[in-house]
Image (cartoon, rainbow, N blue to C red):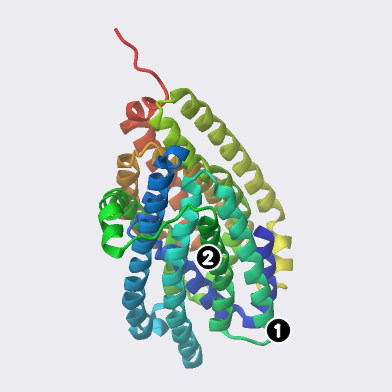
Amino acid sequence: MMLVMLVSVRISLPHLGVDRFGVWMTIASLVGLLNFLDFGIGNALTNRVALYAAPANAKHLRKCVGASLFILGVASVIILFVLYPFAYYLPWQTILKLPTQALYEETQSAMKLFAILFACNIFTSGINKVFFGLQQGYWANIASAVGSVLSLVLIWLAVRSEGGISTLLLASMTGGLIASLGLLVLLVIRNQVEFVAPAESFRLESHYLLRVGGSFFFLQIGGIVVFGADSLIVANALGVAVVAIYSVLQRLFQFVTQPFSVINSGLWPAYANAHAHDDKAFIASTLRRSMMITVGGGLMLSGVLIVLGKPIIAWWTHGEIAVSYALLISFGLWAACDSSANAFSMFLNGVSLMRPQIKGLAALILIGMPLKIYLLNEYGLVAMMLGFTMFFVANILFWIGIVYRETITSFFHEKRSI
């Protein structure tokens, strides 16, 4: 998947140019930015499936999966009708500081297409969540890899045919959608999904998915506001050309974050299962190993990319984009911290400990976001990355290491009796 990302940037940037490439990357980043629109149902589905994953619950599992996917399908249709008018009427030329009328018209067309593709993505992402709940995340990862390769082929064809932003957007998102639908076929073949009547679907699962999904919904909104809006913030402050620089650096350091995300994502249902069986020894040993590997590995990989980043980016972008070591260091530190925080959040999600995450995100929204915007406008991209990373780490240490320390340690230490 990382190789696919590397090649797709290399073949598309010279074709589009810096400004159009920046627009494409900004639109593509909206997938992460708007993921909260599933109302947290996808993440709640992971916990729900983990509860019914035992063979004795096969019948409940089939109905749970079918009803949940139906509810996500309804949500997808609603999302399409909400997003499409925004795509049509929002002043993208002002929001993204587009330099020409032609680029504005091309951007508006791409945004309308994005609304359709994103609505489909909400449904297909729920299929992937089912496999994580079954502790078979490798199937979702295989589908993601297949989808990435398919998208790369489509991007190559789009570039060869001199396609515009909309064509490349369609190519980049279609592969993942097709691969996830393949997972739905696998569920049908394995008799792990049973679609029931709409009213029955809502009766069976809507209460749980909306109740548990509510907490994840807030976390997703907070995560989107704090982490997903960077491309829009940078575009609004410095223009889409700088978004191209930001996007290339972000994708370079995904060689740090993505491998650990894949490794640690499968631990979420494992923690949930261990918590349900009060297996504190498993939780403690797994969390310890996960954090040691992620922190150490993240720092090591970030260091390698900081040293080699300049020649990699020069080759990657055909010399179109140049970066400083200060930028590389700031993105490297952020990638290592982000990977470590994600590893710990898998434990918190698995044991359904949402309060410290919610309060921590509230602090990031109320303090971290204004800090990020201020630093970007006053001092530039390096200051934004370094300043926000320092606040991010301090915020985690405050909530996890001080306020909720006893609560967290109770999940892997027996209480001592006096």
* Mark 1 residue element: helix
Residue drawn at (31%, 63%), measured in percent from left and top?
A: 197
In the depicted structure, whether residue 72 falls above or below residue 244: above
Q: Which residue is mark 1?
A: 160
Q: Quadrant of the C terminus?
A: top left
Q: Residue at x 42, y 84 (%)?
A: 93
Q: Earlier in the sequence, mark 2 or mark 1?
A: 1
Instruction: Identify the element where label 2 is drawn.
Output: helix
Left or right: 76, with 137 as reference point:
left
Nearer the camera: disc 2 or disc 1? 2
Dot 2 alpha-carbon crowd within 10 angstroms: few under 14, some 14 to 19, many 20 or more: some
Of residues 206 and 221, the one drawn nearer to the viewer in this rendering: 206
Q: Is residue 241 left or right of residue 211?
A: right
> Badge 1, how many Cα within 10 Å: few under 14, some, many 20+?
few
Which quadrant of the figure has residue 178? Answer: bottom right
* Residue 316 position by quadrant: bottom right
Extreme-top residue of the structure = 418
Q: Amino acid at mark 2?
A: Leu
User: Could you tell me which residue is drawn at 48 percent across and 23 percent down?
Assistant: 281
In terms of depth relative to the viewer, which is nearer, 133 or 117?
133
Residue marked by disc 2: 181
Percent position (x, y) of residue 327?
Answer: 58, 58
Q: Find the distance from the CA under tag 2 to the CA under tag 1.
A: 27 Å
The image quarter in which residue 356 lies = top left
Residue 102 position, x and y percent, is: 50, 92
Where residue 14 appears, x then y in whole percent? 68, 79
Most distant residue in the bottom direction: 102
Question: Taking the image as drawn, is residue 66 in sight?
Answer: yes
Q: Is residue 246 left or right of residue 406?
A: right
